[in-house]
Amino acid sequence: MSPSRWRTEFPYHWDADDLVTRRDLLQLSVLASGALFLGSLVLAVLGRLDRRRRGTRRRIVRAAEVPEGERFYFSYPGADDQAMLLHLPGGRFVAYSQKCTHLACAVYYQPERKRLFCPCHEGVFDPETGEPTAGPPQRRLPRIVLAREGEWLVAVEERP
Amino acid sequence: MTAPPAPPFDRSAPPGVHALVLAALAIGTLLMALQLWILTVGLDLYLAGRGRGSWLLALVSGLIFLGGVLGVRLVGRVLPIPRG
């Protein structure tokens, strides 16, 4: 490569370059540190004021239509938000979003193995709590609060 | 007869000053890495809906920032920049 070509591609002369001293760098580091602190502070305030609730009260299915050990897939809170209702052994009903907290693949209930399984990256969740037990997911599945209205199971809201 | 030109002012720092500033930079970089990790933990807690406890993380991050501000002031006071 001829010198004239690299100079056209990199048209900066050494004398025109700004000198950044160690002290300047130290001050820039403190500014960056302040920005990181600000980010943590914003998250702390948001966490304190957390009101992230989604969805409105809506009937899902009659309880008798989901036998023990079975599941029922439905949409909640929006029409495109897939969710699942589980009838756990022992008679308890729980509901979670089907969206994996790793990369948002669909999570499925495997009652024979007593687990919620994400086939994309083999993430595993506990069906009792929605907490991750294996694989890459680090956060629990968003829970859907349930209530009963007579024979109907009702979704009240979704919480992270 | 004109006076000989004054020798150029030597702006190089006294021995040991560079090392101290570099040490401050190295420690600051390590603490900033810790702050970055704190930020990711705080974000993870917030996304999990457990952000109520993240004020403690913000406190630690704030203390590191405060330490950095004091450190820079200390470096400026103890190791002043040579002036011509």
Image (cartoon, coloured by chain):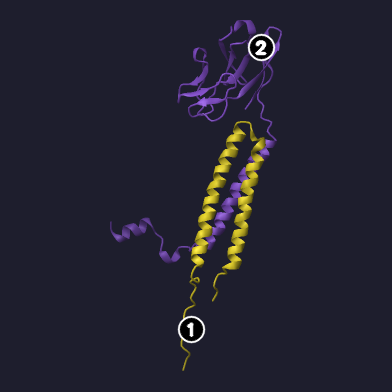
Chain B rendering hue: yellow
Quadrant in the rendering for residue B75? bottom right
Helix, strand or loop at label 1? It is: loop
Amino acid type at circle 1 is: Ala
Residue at 65%, 42% in the rendered image: B56
Image quadrant for the N terminus of chain A? Answer: bottom left
**Farthest residue, direction right:** A150
Chain letter behind tag 1: B
Q: Name the residue under label 2.
A: A153
Who is closer to the viewer here, B71 or A3? B71
Up/down of A55 relative to B21, above or below:
above
Category of crowding for the residue at label 1, using alpha-carbon neighbours closer than 10 angstroms: few (below 14), some (14–19), many (at least 20): few
Q: Is residue A25 visible?
A: no
Residue at 58%, 43% in the rendered image: B38
Residue at 56%, 40% in the rendered image: B40
Marks 1 and 2, Cα distance to the nearest angstrom? Answer: 92 Å
Residue B6 tag number? 1
Amino acid type at circle 2 is: Leu
Chain letter behind tag 2: A
Residue A118 tag number? none
Helix, strand or loop at label 2? It is: strand
| Badges 1 and 2, same chain | no
State the image coordinates of residue A121 (x, y, percent, origin top left): 45, 26
Up/down of A91 relative to B57, above or below:
above
Who is closer to the viewer here, A55 or B44? B44
Chain coloured purple in the rendered structure? A
State the image coordinates of residue A107 (x, y, percent, origin top left): 51, 20
